[in-house]
Amino acid sequence: MVCPICQREIKEIRCKECGRDVYFLGPYCYECGGKLNEDEFDLEKRILCSDDTCIGTINEDGFCNICGKPYSF
C-alpha cells in the first residue's frame, strides 16, 4: 500500500495475536488490537525534526517526513 500523503510504501507485517497480515500503521493491530512487534515501532529510537516548529520525524533518507527539511545537528 502507498501512503496517500507522502507516497511512500507502507509495509505489511503479520500480527502475532490474530495471524493476519496487516499494514504497519502503528504499535497495535487494527484487526484485533494486539500489540505488534515492538522492535518495529520504537518511539525511543525516532529522531525528531530539527525545526522546532515542526512535529515530524527524520526518515531513513535523512529528511523530515512532514516538512521535508534535511536533518541538521
Image: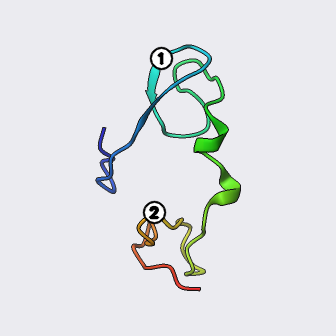
Near-viewer residue (48 or 55): 48
Q: Secondary structure at mark 1?
A: loop
Q: Position of residue 44 (x, y in %)?
A: 71, 57
The residue most toward the bottom is 73
Secondary structure beneath label 2: loop
Whether residue 29 sits left or right of residue 2 in the image: it is right
Horizontal and vertical percent position of residue 5:
33, 54
How many residues crowd around disc 1 within 10 Å: few (fewer than 14), some, or many (20 or more)?
some
Instruction: Please tell me which residue is depicted at 54% across the width and 65% down the height of the picture.
Output: 57
The image quadrant where one finds the N terminus is top left
Q: Is residue 43 above or below residue 65?
A: above
Residue at 53% in and 85% down: 72
Q: Residue at x 59, y 86 (%)?
A: 73
Query: Which residue is denoted by mark 2 in the rendering?
Result: 60
Q: What crowding class fits label 2: few (fewer than 14 Cα within 10 Å), some (14-19), or many (20 or more)?
A: few
Q: Earlier in the sequence, mark 2 or mark 1?
A: 1
Dividing the picture into quarters, in which one does residue 33 lie?
Answer: top right
Q: How many discs mark residues in the rendered view?
A: 2
Q: Amino acid at mark 2?
A: Glu
Q: Kindly give the residue lying farthest to the top in the view shown.
A: 18
For badge 1, the amino acid type reads Arg
Real-space Cα separation, disc 2 to disc 1, in angstroms: 27 Å
- Of the numbered discs in the image, which one, if any, rests on residue 44? none
For image coordinates 54% across by 73% down, the residue present is: 54
Q: Position of residue 50 (x, y in %)?
A: 57, 80
Q: Is residue 69 left or right of residue 15?
A: left
Q: Which residue is mark 1?
A: 20
- Side of 25 where 61 appears, left or right: left
Q: Is residue 60 above or below residue 11?
A: below
